Image (cartoon, rainbow, N blue to C red):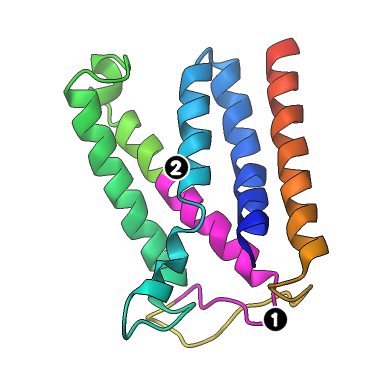
């Protein structure tokens, strides 16, 4: 899948998160989460730049999604403990900041994996436990109509979610 398609899938995955955050009165957090998800939408494709790491190998797995979630959780805990983000001591004490940050990191990578699972090459979600590749084989990774179509659906999903959150 090309960059536009991955952006679209990330936006689709973000839409319900953005809706909830805006409904909870945290539009600034919705903006930060959405920006982070878009910024890191291509993170699993870092394997193109790492010698010896096959494309759609370890970085295209649930294990990598959990690793990125763990990094997000650590950063979230550090920022919250330092008083950044106005989350309050209760959110730090009960761990909700850590859980939320983990879920955002995990979802960021998982959205990329879902996008690649739409193509014939698929992804190995269960690496290193299994060598099985999962694919819906709906279209090729380079299909411009599919990539731009997903991007359009993602923009529409976010716009709709934020409109509903602000008006309901």
Give the residue displayed 38% in from the left and 64% down from the top. Answer: 64
Q: Quadrant of residue 121?
A: bottom right
**Among the two numbered marks 2 and 1 on one chain, the one whose residue lies closer to the N terminus:** 2
Label 1 environment density (alpha carbons within 10 Å; few <14, some 14–19, many ≥20): some
Residue 128 versus residue 154 in the image, above or below = below
> Is residue 110 visible in this depiction of the protein?
yes
Q: Position of residue 86 (x, y in %)?
A: 31, 14
Q: Quadrant of residue 51?
A: bottom left
Magenta highlight on residue 123: yes
Q: Quadrant of residue 130?
A: bottom left
- Judge by depth and name the residue closer to the eye, 6 or 24: 6
Q: Position of residue 22 (x, y in %)?
A: 58, 19
> Is residue 61 visible in this depiction of the protein?
no
Report, in whole angstroms, how far the alpha carbon at label 2 lies from the one at label 1. 27 Å
Q: Is residue 110 shown left or right of residue 102? A: right
The magenta-colored residue range is 105-126
Q: Is residue 44 shown left or right of residue 97? A: right
Give the residue displayed 47% in from the left and 56% down from the top. Answer: 109
Please tell me the numbered disc located at residue 104.
2
């Amino acid at each position: 899948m090309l960059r536009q398609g991955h952006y679209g899938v990330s936006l689709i995955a973000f839409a319900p998160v953005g809706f909830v955050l805006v409904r909870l009165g945290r539009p600034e957090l919705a903006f930060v989460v959405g920006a982070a998800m878009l910024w890191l939408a291509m993170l699993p494709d870092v394997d193109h730049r790492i010698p010896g790491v096959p494309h759609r190998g370890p970085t295209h797995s649930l294990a990598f999604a959990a690793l990125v979630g763990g990094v997000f959780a650590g950063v979230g805990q550090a920022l919250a403990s330092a008083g950044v983000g106005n989350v309050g001591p209760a959110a730090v004490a009960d761990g909700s900041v850590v859980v939320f940050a983990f879920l955002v990191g995990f979802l960021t990578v998982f959205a990329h994996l879902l996008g690649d699972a739409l193509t014939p090459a698929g992804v190995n979600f269960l690496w290193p436990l299994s060598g099985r590749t999962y694919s819906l084989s709906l279209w090729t990774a380079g299909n411009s109509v599919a990539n731009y179509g997903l991007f359009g659906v993602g923009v529409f999903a976010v716009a709709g979610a934020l409109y509903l959150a602000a008006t309901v």
